[in-house]
Image: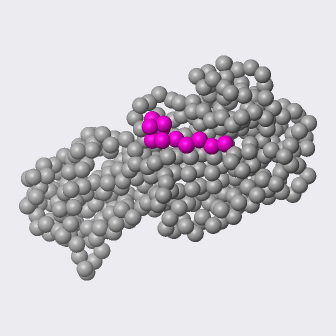
Amino acid sequence: MAITRAGEGEAHSYTIAGAGNTPIEKGTHYLQIIARTWYVNKESGWFYKRSAVGTVAITLGAGSYEQRFEIVLGTYDLSGGSRYAPVFQTPLLSATPYPGGFVTVQAHLSGVKKETELLTMFRGAASASLGIVSGMVQAGGTTGVSATLVPAAGALFGGVTQVLRQADPADRIFDPHSGIQMSLSARDISSDSFHLLLHRGADLDASRLVVDEKSGIVLHDGQPLEDGAWVLFQLNRLTETPDPRPWHQPAQDLRLELDNLFYDLKADIYDQQRALTELLPSTHKNTLWNRLHLLRANIESDTAITEVTARAAKALLANRFLLAKRAIATNDPDAYFRGVAELRASLLPSLSLRAERGHLRAPREAVSIDEDTVWLARNAASIKLLPRLNRILI
């Protein structure tokens, strides 16, 4: 295959897929996108006077559900005889709930003369844009609280894009207006991890493309791909977010205080009636039940988690409280701890819902809590895919 210089050839996009046949699902999965490696086939003299600069725009969904994240990649600088830019350590898009519809990744690359002060701006913009996008994801996409971050991201991205479009035509690597992009449907994202390659150069045989997982270098026919210019992304489909949520610590605190209630009941520090009042709503004190009500509202309003994560968190908390009600009704604190141990072992509710109803005077939200626990029983397989959440709540 004849080697193409960067800035020449046609635009191509390829998926280098992992094994899997289950499409990504709205409400169940998160999507994470990482820039692994980028390569620009230019002679060493070109890099002596220039650096390559890149931007990436990621669009999730469409219409009123569309979320757009704009990131500056920074500068492509080679050192120590390396031919490839270093692997990025920070995800471009941290785990965000998949909103349904298409996922589009678009990249622009261009050369910029090193003596210009713009290089310093590009490096700063790269760090700032990654921080802004991370904040947008943590706040829940591009709506609500995170909407205040959108103008900042747009200003950074727009400024860099304008500079790239005005670059010397001889230094342009990807088309300055359209760049190179690829749109993926839910069915295209059918494995837990795969790679997306945006490439300008010769037409490649997709079946001969593989990625060296350790180095992040693309191989074609077993040899490093040194044709034209390319950017390699890794897309990960996750069942839970690795990022802490604001309600994680309050949820863990509530679980521990519920445990302490039964230690006190067992030690006769609390009597049965006093313990029961903690499991009922109150307008006079902040009972454990009141805190559960507030915590569930915070979980429901968290737009940075999937429906499955939210439902599982509420269900695990509800199951704890139903175990507590049953143990207090029989004045048997050890029944609570046995139930918790069984839950840890099986991730299934260890009580009979039909027998549970009527044991105690029903609080105002007994029906919704029972519904959460029924969901837990029917979706045990989903709960088992959320080990981080289980460690917090079980």
In the image, which residues are magenta?
180-190
Residue pictured at 63% horizontal, 46% vertical: 106
Is the image coloured rainbow, by chain, by secondary structure, or in one colour? one colour
Quadrant in which residue 229 is drawn: top right
Left or right, 236 with reference to 81: left
Q: From what the image shows, is residue 64 above or below residue 348? A: below
Q: Residue 327: image x %, image y %?
A: 16, 56
Q: From what the image shows, is residue 353 above or below residue 44? A: below
Q: Which residue of the protein is positioned furthest toward the bottom in this rendering?
A: 284
348, 65: nearer the viewer: 65
191, 356: nearer the viewer: 191
Residue pictured at 25% horizontal, 79% vertical: 283
358, 170: nearer the viewer: 170
Q: Residue 38: image x %, image y %?
A: 71, 38
Which corner quadrant holds the N terminus? top right
Q: Residue 228: image x %, image y %?
A: 76, 32
- Asked whether residue 338 is in view, the answer is no
Left or right, 147 with reference to 276: right
Q: Is residue 239 magenta?
A: no
Residue pictured at 54% horizontal, 40% vertical: 235
Left or right, 203 with reference to 81: left
70, 9: nearer the viewer: 9
Left or right, 127 with reference to 333: right
Q: Residue 47: image x %, image y %?
A: 87, 40
How many callouts does the rendering have? 0
